[in-house]
Image (spheres, rainbow, N blue to C red):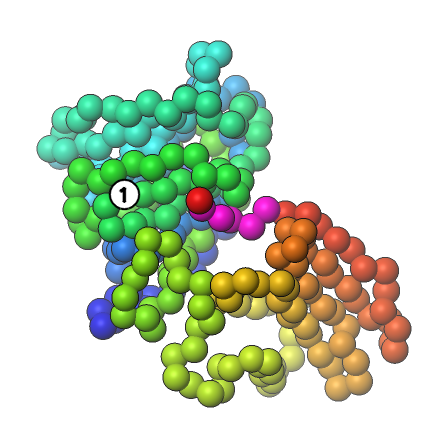
Amino acid sequence: MDPMSLLLQPPVFYPVVPYACTIFGGLQYGRMILIQGRVTSDAVRFQIDFQCGCSTRPRSDIAIHFNPRFSSSDAHVICNTLCRDKWLDEQKFSGFPLRRGNSFVLLFLFLADKVKVSISGQHFLDFSYRLPLRDVDTLGIYGDVSVKEVSFLSTNPYHAEMTEYPLCQPLKPGNSDLTLPLSRPLPMGLSEGQMILVRGLVTENPEEITFSLKSKNNTPFKLTASFKDNSLCYDYSMGQSWGEPQKIHTPFFVFP
């Protein structure tokens, strides 16, 4: 197994656009990149490029150029490839659901021969590769957009065979310590500003997942992700009793 495929790159929060960063280990079949942001109120266009390097002279090849445009009544996306400083034939995708000022969540799923793109949980386009995916090592974001977060996600590295979509099986690399239910101590406790990141894969027919924080005497916080109604519900306890539960409806990111 290629050790680079196991790298988990930390997320980037509120990068200044134009922004470019290295993709740890490069792009590989099965990886995903999630971008949360907002289109500016006077946007003409922005672009997300998956580049083969970060050179400007000569300009690096761009394997995947994702370019939403808002200057006409038909908001649309242009996808293309830059090879040896020349653009190839562009592909236009009409019906882009975002407008100026809109917030968005873009998810790029990289398959063996194409990238699939969803917008706020809804599949939008497929774009076939024209350059080898293995050559891509840089993400670039430019234009009329502000970005809240960029997350780098991986599918299950413990399965040798890949399918067209991310495997929906629990992440169990043969270690009994990772079977559910799972509990781990926090030796230093928690303090303001700390973050807990949980990565995993849901089962084939999920109902809900619950995460909780516990003290010696009670459970002060509980978060439940429900796949029945696409919601997040969080509860907090006051002493021995629970407070009023709060529910947030949010789309989970599903491709057809």
**Residue lying farthest to the front in this orientation:** 205
**Apparent side of residue 166 relative to residue 26 in the rendered image (left or right):** right
Question: The N terminus appears in which quarter of the rendering?
Answer: bottom left
Instruction: Tell me what residue is drawn at x 25 percent, y 38 percent.
Output: 128
Image spot of residue 109 (x, y percent) = 37, 48
Specify whether residue 118 is painted magenta.
no
The residue that mark 1 highlights is 114
**Apparent side of residue 115 relative to residue 82 in the rendered image (left or right):** right
Q: Nearer the viewer, residue 11 or 192?
A: 11
Image quadrant where residue 183 sits: bottom right
The vertical placement of 15 against 205, above or below, is above
Instruction: Tell me what residue is drawn at x 67 percent, y 51 percent.
Output: 229
Q: In the rendered structure, which amino acid carries the disc numbered 1?
A: Lys
Instruction: Tell me what residue is drawn at x 51 percent, y 82 percent.
Output: 179
**Apparent side of residue 180 relative to residue 190 in the rendered image (left or right):** left
Q: Nearer the viewer, residue 219 or 55?
A: 219
Image quadrant where residue 85 sits: top left
Specify whether residue 254 is painted magenta.
yes
Image spot of residue 71 (x, y percent) = 44, 14
Q: Which residues are magenta?
A: 251-255
Image spot of residue 210 (x, y percent) = 65, 69
**Residue lying farthest to the top in this orientation:** 73
The vertical placement of 143 against 245, above or below, is above
Q: Is residue 147 visible?
A: no
